[in-house]
Image (cartoon, rainbow, N blue to C red):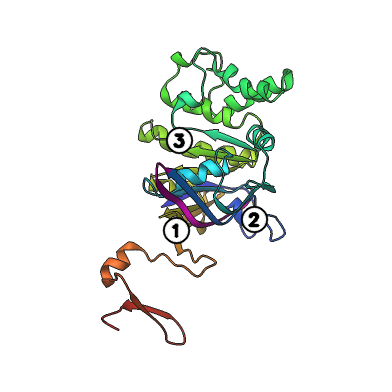
Amino acid sequence: MERVFDVSVDTRSRPSENPAETVGPATEPLIVCENLVKIYKVADLEVVALQGLDLVVQPAELMAIVGNSGSGKSTLLNILGGLDRPSAGRVTVAGRDMVKMSERGLVRYKREVVGFVWQQTARNLIPYLTALENVELPMMIAGRSGRKWTEWAKELLDAVGLADRMRHRLSALSGGEQQRVAIAIGLANRPRLLLADEPTGSVDTATGNRIFDMFRELRDAYGTTTIIVTHDISVMAKVERTVAIRDGRTSSELIRRVRVEDVQQVDGRSQVVLGETHEEFTVLDPAGRLQIPRDYIERLGLRGKVKVDFDGEQIIVRPADEA
């Protein structure tokens, strides 16, 4: 993948293309999950949705969480959004302990700290209100009103490309436009964290790509930490980090890196050619557990018990019968 950017700065000294990489070591993570467990009781059965999940998210990071149905990604989203509590483990968001937080504290947290964008627009929008009134509504619920907040609502709608549609009711807006209104609503109370659950699931591919680009533009403009939960693995080309969840635990991370390929002179102006690569990491949790990629397991014929050896430089995993 190659992109060409027109620049007028000294290319010998450039800031990182990844805002998450510019966060210094002294900066506290916005989200920390340690050994997170969630168990649901259904009749006489217990369903383990999360089993020892660990995750760290830095401020102003744009990342995605992917996984198959039942992997635990939606459960994690609900916990981070204050809609559910974990059964065990530790999770803090913006310095708040989500396990010990009171019910009143959770209400305030959902109003002030976190914003939501749902796949179903009915969960975001009031159909008989205009786009502008929909964005103003969460501000009013939080006790914020007046010209200052109306101007902020207009700024958000302008940022999502709906400056000329803000007085329209939802029936006059397309599905993609309605989802853009939902994004503006999610940012209405200036949250530090924006959670998007399958935000492109009900729109076509071209509109979905535009929405992903919009998340990046809004993060760059307002510095909001953004987590997109989706089953669409193509999202990894739009975010800096993609975390895969399998069986209730983080199994791998894919880091998107942007590097300078070349600097060209075109009509006397410098153009930087940027290339993108992805580097995949398998996650080793604090207990030493490692989820081996499924294709490796199948290729090596691993099942049941395996033999683990250390030759002084590397760890070797092989089938027990072969050992």
Q: Mark 2 touching mark 3, by CB under 8 A?
A: no
Tag 2: residue type? Thr
Name the residue: 62% across, 20% down: 137
Tag 3, which secondary structure? loop
Q: Which residues are magenta?
A: 42-58
First in sequence: mark 2 vs mark 1: 2
- Residue 314 belongs to the span the image colors magenta: no
Counting labels gives 3
In-image side of 249 versus 305 (left or right): right
Mark 1: give few (<14), some (14-19) or many (20+) Cα within 10 Å.
some
Tag 2, which secondary structure? helix
Q: Residue furthest front?
A: 44
How far is the residue under mark 2 from the one under mark 3?
A: 27 Å
Instruction: Name the residue that disc number 3 marks.
Output: 199
Q: Relative to 316, is 171 above or below?
A: above
Please identify the dominant SS of the magenta region: strand
